[in-house]
Amino acid sequence: MVNHRYSQSNGALIKNTGHRPEVVTAKPKVSYLHYIHYFRAVAIIGIVAVHCKSSFLWGSKLEEQFWSSLLVYSTVLFVFIAGFLFQHIHSRRFDYKNYLSKKFTYVIIPYIFASIPAILEKLYLDPESMTWLPVYLQDQPAILKVFYMLLTGKHFGPFWFIPMISMVYVISPLLVYLDKKPWFYRFVFPPVFVAGLFMFNFGYEFTTIESFAFFIPIYIFGMWASRHKESITGLQYKLLIPLASLCVIFIVLEMTGVISLDTSYGAYRPEETYELPFNFGKLKMSLLCLVMLNSFYLIREKNLPVLSLLADYSFGVYFVHLYVIRAIEQLVYQTGHSFVFNSFYFVLHVILVTLSCCLIIFLIKKLTGQKSRYFIGS
């Protein structure tokens, strides 16, 4: 038996067999970014919190405005991270077929499983709630309605995100191509990003195309940040302090009414008044992405097990959190008592929902073992 030996030269392995050297191409290693992992945990907390916020009435309008200003665009954080990791992982080597296969396995299949309760509820328990269903589908077989729900995410509040991000998956080869072109980030990305700051329509009430148009500049923003991560994180407090200060200023302006919260968060439709207002909320959350990026980079060496676990469970938390929120709401309503939020109770509610989600995911992982990602995405 021949004893093969390997030496490394310029990223390739040279296999010595005693004859002519044979070059074996080594797959480039992708470094693991702990600070992005921790950032992901904060992003999923924001998404849980923004849906918790509307569970009950608020006693103080000012407190509600503060949490609205801080949380409502939390999906921006999630999309930014997705773009960041896409560029970080696939900038050197990209296998489109394998990429789509993994996304189907670990995103689409869990999405289908997580959708089953919501679809059954829409079809059989609360058919009157399907007013969003197009007229031409009202009298069609259930299978067509199910297909429409999965294609649009209209069956359950946060599930609009999966059809939207799936559009990004489809165009990923174009994004990889553009990422390699210096002119793209210099001349194309800036106007695309600025144009995105004049958009408002996204989410459950709008179409997948509208949500895609709203978020694709943020996804590319994440790719840009990944390509320049050494420069961005190298600035540390020189970047962190001024951007964090700007975010605080925006929050104060929103809470004092200088910037209207009503025109900053999704429900505003510029075409109704023929205005073209600027989306300060989206800009604020985009700046917060860089603040979070630098903040977690500064503490990247620290061991933060709670954030690490939450980041590991993040996709599963996304799939189950609204089910948990609705269950808690029903339990409270069944008692016959009214419940009013203040900041303390709101934070407790977010913690309770998050812990409940983690417990559910833990149990599913125990039951399904290594196949848990097929069922819950985590």
Image (cartoon, helix red, strand yellow):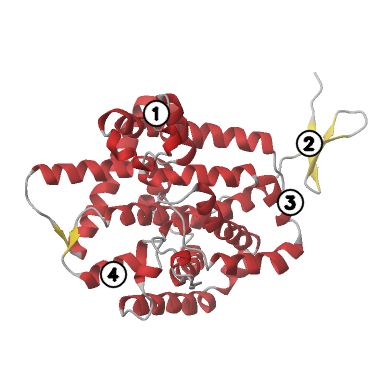
Residue 88 screen position, x and y as percent:
62, 52
Taking the image as shown, residue 26 lies to the left or right of residue 155, namely: right
For this orientation, the residue located farthest to the right is: 20
Gap between marks 2 and 3 measured at Cα: 33 Å
Pair 1/3: label in front: 1
Tag 3 residue: 177
- Seen at 43% across and 43% down, the residue is 315
Tag 2 residue: 6
Marking on residue 8: none
The disc, 1 or 2, on the residue closer to the chain's N-terminal end is 2
- Seen at 29% across and 70% down, the residue is 66
Q: What residue type is disc 1 on?
A: Asp
The disc, 2 or 3, on the residue closer to the chain's N-terminal end is 2
Residue 344 screen position, x and y as percent:
19, 63
Pair 4/2: label in front: 4
Residue 373 in view (yes/no): no
Taking the image as shown, residue 215 lies to the left or right of residue 1, namely: left
Gap between marks 1 and 2 measured at Cα: 67 Å
Q: What residue type is disc 2 on?
A: Tyr
Q: What residue type is disc 4 on?
A: Gln
Pair 1/2: label in front: 1
Write down the quadrant of residue 248 in the picture. bottom left
